[in-house]
Image: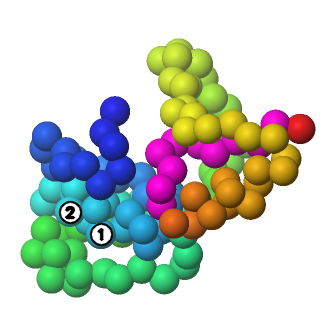
Amino acid sequence: MVASGERLPEQVDVVVETVGPATFGHSVASARVGARIVVCGSSTGFTAELDLAKVFARELTVVGSTTGSRAEFGEMLALVERHQLRPVVDSITELDGVADQVRRMLDGSAFGKLCVTL
């Protein structure tokens, strides 16, 4: 597990970017030459600065992705189960704490999922 913004031990082939502007620069810096950055979320906004020099110098591919097909979703669930993948949960709050959870999501101070219990 690597904390948000923490330097990786080495650059990676694929970055799954789910946050948006708050982490996009880090995603680009984390990508090795020829890597792909898959953007599938934007919880901190929809407009991110992009260092074009890094994109072309590293020959990066940036692609957008929504959910796949029903079959692909099933394959993903099977992979999660097979490898016992579990999300990192930052915190769980009651319904009256939603505003604070949203604030933490938007300001980037959370690490992991922000959950609300009903």
4 versus 77 height, above or below: below
Q: Nearer the viewer, residue 59 or 7?
A: 7
Asked whether residue 42 is in view, the answer is no
Q: Residues within 10 Å of mark 2 (few under 14, many from 20)?
A: some
Q: Which residues are magenta?
A: 108-117
Q: Are marks 1 and 2 in contact (CB under 8 Å)?
A: yes
Image quarter in which the N terminus is found: top left
> For this view, does 80 lie left or right of residue 14?
right
Q: Position of residue 50 (x, y in %)?
A: 31, 81
Amino acid found under the numbered disc labelled 1: Gly
Instruction: Please tell me which residue is depicted at 13% across the width and 68% down the height of the picture.
Output: 58
Q: Position of residue 99 (x, y in %)?
A: 74, 60
Helix, strand or loop for disc 1: helix
Circle 1 residue: 25
Q: Nearer the viewer, residue 20 or 4?
A: 4
Amino acid found under the numbered disc labelled 2: Ala
Q: Residues within 10 Å of mark 1 (few under 14, many from 20)?
A: some
Q: Position of residue 19 (x, y in %)?
A: 50, 61
Asked whether residue 45 is in view, the answer is yes
Image quarter in which the C terminus is found: top right
Instruction: Please tell me which residue is depicted at 31% across the width and 60% down the height of the picture.
Output: 27
Q: Nearer the viewer, residue 113 or 93?
A: 93
Q: Position of residue 84 (x, y in %)?
A: 52, 17
Q: Which mark is residue 62?
A: none
Circle 2 residue: 29
